[in-house]
Image: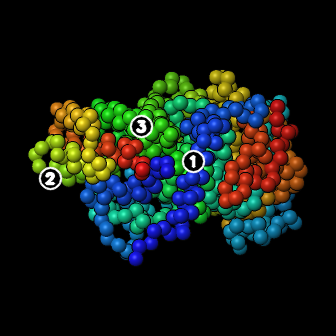
Amino acid sequence: MSKQRMEAEVIRDSILAVSGRLNLKAGGPGFKPRIRADLLDASQRNKWPVLTEDGPEQWRRSVYIYVKRQLLMPSLELFDAPTTTDSCALRTQSTVPTQALVMMNDEFVEDQASFLAINVARVGEELDSAIRRMFMLVLSRHPSDSRMKQALQFVNDRARQSDRQSALADLAHVLFNSSEFIYIQ
Amino acid sequence: MTQPFTRRQILQRAGAGFGSLGLQSLLAGDGALKSTNPLAPRAPDYAPKAKSVIFLFMYGGPSHVDLFDPKPELARWHGRAIPVWKQEDAFMGSKTKNVAMQSYYKFAKHGQAGIDMAETFPNLARHADDLCVIRSMHTESNNHGPAIFQMNTGFIQPGRPSMGSWVTYGLGSESENLPAFVVLLDHQGAPVNGALNWSNGFMPATYQGVPFRSSGEPIAYLTPPKNVSAAQQRARLDLLRQWNTEYAEANPAETQLAARISAYELAFRMQMSASECTDLSREPECVRKMYGLDNKVTAHFGKNCLLARRLVERGVRFVQVYSGGNEGPKAWDAHDDLKRNHDLHCAETDGPIAALLDDLKISGMLDSTLVVWGGEFGRSPVAENGKGRDHHPKGFTMWMAGGGIKGGQIYGATDEFGYNAIENKVSVPDLHATMLHQLGLDHEQLTYRFTGRDYRLTDVSGEVVRALLA
């Protein structure tokens, strides 16, 4: 069986689950997630709120995202979430640069990477064990020896430019963008 | 009690499991999987006249009888009922009365061809011999939403791929570093239904229009969050490329994994080159002035026209430039006061459009760039609220220039009131068929299978209008 790319909502929910911030509150009215202010052009009526940061209410599962006909969530739309006007028997599975841009540059991914870094740092002072824990959470496997070596070197290099916490967040960001996370075996 | 498989699971595994093994080798054999880039340039059906399209979309519906289709009869019938009027054509119901309204503007003939143009286009007038004015356009809906959908996608319903998506699907992209289909919005905002107007519809998302923003970032998520430095991003991407490459090499049958690596590389290049492209300060002062960037009235539309030229120059296939946004007076939607509305929107666009045509001509790009001007419909020859005009789909004007179109001609005609298109009528699918033809695409061959049938931009109609071609 070939590998399947996670669907738009699944990518978002998986990132939240892994970072430890997923809010499993069920039911109730939908929520309007943070969308960069400069992407709200298309919206005229029933305005989308301009949020500078998000919190537990925005960390609910994607199934509860408020659906506005003329403003699809840009990050979901780019990952082939269907339009709201036709039934969709099978989603396309595109691979386009604009997806790379959203995964590289969306504040949501950035914030959740920081949360994951905080999350794994709780296991102790050892950098090794923090990285191991991060691999287990994101990829459900231990890092190979060579990966471990590369990851350690990356985090140490980055930490010299900033600090260890931010360097771990950099690593989390790389893992969220990795094909091994985005594709399901 | 355990349930080993549901019926659905068995079907899925049997269908996509064994079946897909055979399919995989079949596809690999005929090369369908070899090109992993859906935007790779593809050969047209026949030699194209145009490589790119700049569609100047006058959203709201510019008034044909006030701009390109003079009707002396309206002055004679001014204030009286005209025999061709039908209540059912009026969008605003009883606000629109069957009372003919003469034009507020003076017309003159321009160029060797003697193209009639209103006094509101003093600059465009010098391009009269470049314009192919179609006076016999007609469309299906008298409502903005469905009429814009039809002009953009061929259908009055939402959810179909837009023309830019069809063109990109048919021809691929000529640009390594930029999207193939770009939408430039008016400073007043997006037209009604926003992104549905440049949607890929049922095609893969690759083909959707990328709206550049009028201020700030031109492309969604083109810059990293403020607290992420360039060095930090580069370090992340280097490690990512290493790991993604190893993963793709370990799974050579999965072509998307390799495509993903090149997508990240293009994304990184876009971060650089898209900002280079949109940086208009790189243009000489005289060019900026020519497009009216130094004038408050023309600066916005002028900026988008100049941007359109820079995009086409860099291989972007389809650029749509909107004049007018949001609703009512912010668009060409002159319900209340036609003169006030069209005075403004003509003043905003006349100079920049003339500059764009000049610029394309000077740089030798007009021959390979099809420029199209028009809205989703025209405006009614009768009055609304005394001095406005209602929507009107039964006859209106559009023009084309460049891209192998025969300039200096007027094609088709409306009746003596400008109400119904009566001579050499051109439908929206006819216009689409002609545009695709100039790009080297046969509108009957360009199909996409969806919900069990082949769709076309022109659906089941459309004829190339040969008389428009050079």
Q: Chain of mark 1?
A: B
Residue at image mark 1:
B21
Question: Which of the chains bears the disc numbered 2?
Answer: A
Residue B209 figure quarter: top right
- x and y percentages locating residue B277 in the rendered image: 49, 31
Mark seen at residue A122: 2
Left or right of residue B56, residue A134 in this image: left
> Mark 3 = which residue?
B250
Outermost residue toward the left in this view: A125
Give, as a three-letter code, the residue at label 1: Leu
Which element is circle 2 on?
Answer: loop
Identified by mark 2, the residue type is Arg
Task: Give yes or no for contact between labels 1 and 3 (Cβ–Cβ under 8 Å).
Answer: no
- Whether label 2 touches label 3, CB < 8 Å: no
Q: Residue at x 67, y 59 (%)?
A: B451
| Front-most of residues A30 and B469 | A30
Residue extending furthest toward the right:
B423
Horizontal relation, residue B167 to residue B209: left or right: right
Q: How many marks?
A: 3
Q: Is residue A5 left or right of residue B192?
A: left
Q: Where B394 sits versus B97, above or below?
A: above
Q: Measure the alpha-carbon separation of dots 2 and 3.
A: 33 Å
Give neighbour class at mark 2: few <14, some 14-19, many 20+ (Cα, 10 Å).
Answer: few
Element marked by disc 3: helix
> How many C-alpha atoms fall within 10 Å of the one at disc 1: few (<14), some, or many (≥20)?
few
